[in-house]
Amino acid sequence: MKSKIKFLTCLFVLCLIVILPSMTLFSDDSYVPQEGFVPNGLTAAEIAEAILVPIYGSENINKQKPFKVKLKNNIWYVSGVLSPDFVGGVATVEISKKDARILKVSHGK
């Protein structure tokens, strides 16, 4: 139950981040946090999980935890970790640190 609430909360926040900037309520001088909308690896991992679970399923994604998170050129690279008993590739998400745009979603074979 706790994980469902966490997932739904992350999904709601992600929807706000994606939808609200495109609405006419915001002007060009909209507030942008100094550290960007995705200021740390934990936030990036939570956003990635909210993106990956509906696509690949929670069982698949949970087997790839803990995620490996790297920041390079203001892009968060979040990828699953291949455990010894896991067959196949891992999921990867690229997220803009500044505005939380999802730049790429993929899964190895």
Image: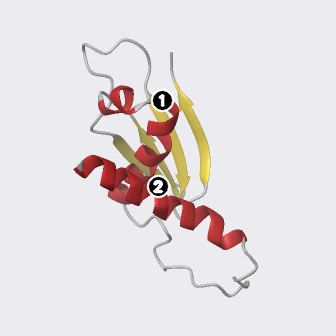
Distance from Cα at disc 1 to Cα at disc 2: 15 Å
Snapshot quadrant of residue 85:
top left
What label does residue 11 carry, if any? 2
Badge 2 marks a residue whose secondary structure is helix
Q: Please report the residue visible at 36 percent of the width from the left and 56 percent of the height from the top.
A: 41
Left or right placement of residue 21 versus residue 72 in this view: right
Q: Residues within 10 Å of mark 2 (few under 14, many from 20)?
A: some
Q: Which mark is residue 56?
A: 1
The residue located at (55%, 60%) in the rendering is: 15
35 lies above or below 44: below
In this view, the residue in front, 33 or 74, is 33
Q: Position of residue 16 (x, y in %)?
A: 55, 67
Q: Quadrant of residue 79?
A: top left
Type of the residue with mark 1: Tyr
Name the amino acid type tagged 2. Leu
Earlier in the chain: of badge 1 and badge 2, it is 2
Judging depth in this view, the residue of 25 and 72 nearest the camera is 25
64 relative position to 91: left or right: left
